[in-house]
Image (cartoon, grey):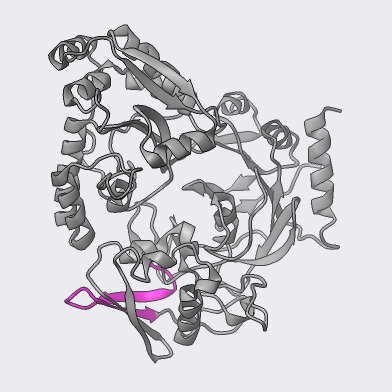
Amino acid sequence: MSRPFFRLAALAGAGLACGAALAQTTVTVAQPADIRSTNPGVNRDNTTDGIVLNMVEGLVGYRQDGSVGPLLAQSVEVSPDGLTYTFKLRKGVKFHNDAPLTSADVAWSWKRYMDPKTDWRCLSEYDGRNGLKVVETATPDDATFTMKINRPSAVFLDSLARSDCGMTAILHRSSVKPDGSWDKPVGTGPFKFGEWKRGEYVTVTAFKGYTSPPGATKVDGYVGLKAPLVDTVRFLVVPDAATAAAGLKSGAIDAAQITSSDAQELKTDRNLVVQAPTEATKNTLLIQTRDPLLKNQKLRQAIAASLDMEQIVAAASEGLGTVNNAAIHKTSAFYGPVQKKGYHYDPALAAKLLREAGYKNEKIVIQTNKRAHVPSYTVAVLAQAMMQSVGINAQIEVLEWATQLDRYNSGNYQMSSFTYSSRLDPALSYEQFSGPKDKQSRKVWEDPQALKLLDESFAESDPKKRQALFDQIHALMIQQVPMIMLFNGIDAWGVRKRLSGFSVWEGKPRLWGVSAAAKAS
């Protein structure tokens, strides 16, 4: 027996021993790492969020198109001055302990998040350190919660909905122990916390008292129809990709994240379906616009023209990805005709721009790393070859990820093959890399006109006016080439055909709406 199969058998056996009577409809999902905690938005990573968000919910959540909709709130009203948000709570919502949801629970949860001792990841978004501050909250009645902020913000609800913030989950106070320390999530989501055996598995069980938002007819991001259709989900820790693939083939695992290379092989298995949804992560080539050489815009334009991006993306994603030169994800409500306009592969134009730039064979170094599940190295190798083919002296420097990240944060690079984490609202996406470098060395683009438009997009709430702003920002970015956005992340998963309704969104498995046929004996 091979080591991967032995490891899988051991883990599966441990999972089966977790209770005397696992429900008949049990789904096993392999995760590459253990969770960091069960505390929403605290001590978390993407794997943690993917499990916890099956158990908890916030006042609002993201729809599939990246817009924000009500979740525990029945409605959200914003005052004419843009400063006061009034959340009317849905009727009939219960916590996992069957206690009814009231505005007092919202107020308690918010007070806990705003306590520095909680160590909530997103505290700085609301306490004034980043400019915006929640200055007042109130509970006019059991079904109403209000929040007042110090200045209008188009992304206030987006920040509440962010998965890395734990969706600002509303929790029952029994989630903490009498001394105030964390115990376990008692939320309102479609699944309840079952057991966490560290390093081995986490189980969640269906919350039979769950009700989806009124009028929901389909799965829609983190809102919409969220019915729990299986009794138990076991999230099994399987760090080794080969073990996960073996488990999928044998039927010991029902769903697992897989590598792009494994995806090609598993597509031929008649018992499996390979899903490869894109997410809003951004795979890019950063360019240091303060570099003595690369501050020349024509040189940066020449680099863009030298790259056959279709070929780069096909190779870096094993044929699963598509080119997107916009910082806005293709499924976003703000991705329109302007965002479809990008760079064009034109070696002759690249050569012409190099001559106009006065380029004299100076060395340009592309920093990269060899981490799994990110395309940094493949992108760098292909970009180097294509740049060299038009006469650019491109070289590669392979770094440990921690070193590359330090170089990025200090702005110490010429070019860097770099992946940004997901941001669904366009303003938040652009903000990741835009800003004055004198204040934050990690910023990539500091054009004053672009920053002015970006500031306006944070304050403007009208979707049509925001679209016009994002269109202008995109056009400037394509012209100035402070970085080259190549394609969005691909999250390949293998799924046993006995599952119906399983989906992954923004890198996280959604277990609501999933049903399972009996396993073949």
The spot of residue 457 in percent (x, y) is 20, 55
Between 170 and 165, the one lying in front of the other is 165
The spot of residue 424 in percent (x, y) is 36, 51
The spot of residue 252 in percent (x, y) is 75, 41
Asked whether residue 79 is drawn in magenta, I would say: yes
Q: In the picture shown, does residue 12 fall above or below 2?
A: below
Left-right relation of 335 to 212: left
User: In percent of the image, x 56 and y 48: which residue is there?
Assistant: 502
User: In percent of the image, x 60 and y 35: which residue is there?
Assistant: 258
Evaluate whether residue 457 shows in this view. yes
Left-right relation of 142 to 18: left
Q: Main secondary structure of the magenta part?
A: strand
Between 174 and 44, the one lying in front of the other is 44
Evaluate whether residue 225 shows in this view. no
Q: In the picture shown, does residue 225 fall above or below 289?
A: below
User: In percent of the image, x 25 and y 33: which residue is there?
Assistant: 290
The boundaries of the magenta stretch are 70-88
How many numbered badges does the structure rendering display?
Answer: 0
Left-right relation of 8 to 32: right
Left-right relation of 322 to 226: left
Between 431 and 212, the one lying in front of the other is 431
User: In percent of the image, x 73 and y 53: which residue is there?
Assistant: 201
Q: In the picture shown, does residue 426 fall above or below 137?
A: above
The quarter of the picture where the N terminus appears is: top right
Between 121 and 323, the one lying in front of the other is 121
